Amino acid sequence: MRVVDWFRDRAVQRVVRFGLPVTIGKAVTSVTGLITLAVLARHLGPTRFGVLALLRTVVMVTEQYANFNTWQAVIKYGTQAIADGRRDDVKRVIKLATVIDVTTAVIETVVIVGLAFVIPEAFGWSSNLSILCAIYAVTVLTRVAGVADGIFRICDAYRVQAIASTISALSSTIAIVIAVLLDTSFAGCVIALAIGEVIGNVYLTATAFWVAGKHGYGGWSRSSLRGARTTFPGILHFMVTTNAQLTVRKTMGEADMFIVGAMLGAFASGLLRVIKQLGTLPARVFLPFEQVLFTELARYAAAGDFVAFRRLLRRSVGLATIGSIALWAVAAVGAEPIVRIVAGDAFVGAAPAFRWYLLAMVLGVANAPVLRSMILLGRPGTLFVLDLATLVILVGAVIAGAWAWGLVGVSLALLLHRVLHIVCATWLVARLIRQRETGRAVPLEPGLP
């Protein structure tokens, strides 16, 4: 069957139709992110920009260790409740996710503030940087992204999500542009970035709750959580295992920053942050479709239609692979001018490593639907074990690569990790789907239905 025929699949058409507005929103967000990067990189220079990159990495990684990524539970259990006509249970899962998000946000902030006065010794930071790190941690308090993302998806409010995400991203960019126009110091830039993110986070969350109200779930705050574990069998186990898995994945994504910061210094960290920011371009284009895909696959899983599940997954992976490879080819050819335009001449040394890093990111985009499907097949713990095992390999490879070839070695190490991850994940998911299609029992992990 020709690739063009895949678009006649109604499920693929839904993914494309709902994914397009999210992609447009992500594209605008990417542009604003690049503007923020360009302004900060030119204003601060590679070394101070590298310090800011490490500071934000500390906050992001620490946040993931307590963040339960509740959007996955909202989609998995909310979609099933909607299919069964249990509207009150949709409200209950929204409230449960909100309580967890708010509680973990408070814990994360306290932990980050504590770490802010410990980590500087590892990177040679001053006491002033410790205070700035603690100030930036306040952004975590306003980040209730998990339940907000879940609400947008189960309500098919992708266009509203795209608009809200764009406005949210613009708040940070505007704050930074104002700070630079006023010629503020490094501290001023950090504070401006924090203010912009807080405004954006609050707006995005408020919009999500407005969407919930419009779709008949506005009374979620009055719902009782009594008996939630009975109503949603295995939900706590599901959240813990998916959180552990996504925590490991975030560690994978940011471990290279810590290693480069410790081994190669702040200048190299600044170059790597530019590489990583540019490396998100394939994900910005294709992962919005994967977000819609996750919801569609969840509906097939809820209906027990694993033949359609496999067909949609295969076609989605194929389209993502073709599109992302084409994007990589264009970016690889123009790597040097792209880096020069975005970050300036001082960062042009990042171009060689950027080519390999972007290829690794492209492979990660192609593999994303496979990883998400493992969660819907009831095996988040298996995915966690796979991620943890390959993380050990990644850390060793990044250290060796940084020691031997600098930033290029770091990018090659990540590329090796992505190839290994794809091979293992594809084999596992193919086996699970084959067993479901043939009707053979597939033992789920403890606590999952």
Image (tube, rainbow, N blue to C red):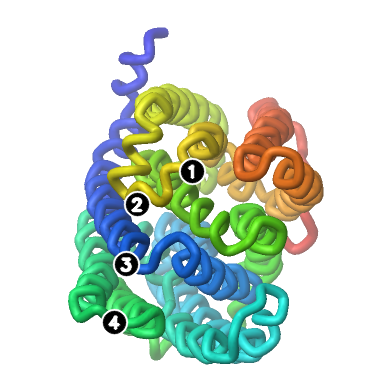
Determine which residue is flagged by label 4.
184
| CA–CA distance in space, label 1 to label 4 | 27 Å
327 or 37, nearer to the observer: 37
Residue in view at x 69 percent, y 33 percent:
416
Determine contact: label 1, label 2, CB under 8 Å.
yes
Q: x and y percent of residue 169 in the render?
A: 28, 66
Upstream in the sequence, badge 3 or badge 4?
3
| CA–CA distance in space, label 3 to label 4 | 9 Å
Residue type of the residue flagged with mark 4:
Thr
Instruction: Looking at this view, name the residue that lies furthest to the front.
Output: 346
Determine which residue is flagged by label 3.
43
310 or 419, nearer to the observer: 419
Label 4 crowd (10 A; few <14 / some 14-19 / many >=20):
some
Left or right position of 124 against 345 = right
Residue in view at x 31 percent, y 23 percent:
7
Label 1 crowd (10 A; few <14 / some 14-19 / many >=20):
many
Residue in view at x 29 percent, y 36 percent:
16
Residue 100 appears in the figure: yes
Q: Quadrant of residue 258?
A: bottom right
Determine which residue is flagged by label 1.
350
Upstream in the sequence, badge 1 or badge 2?
2
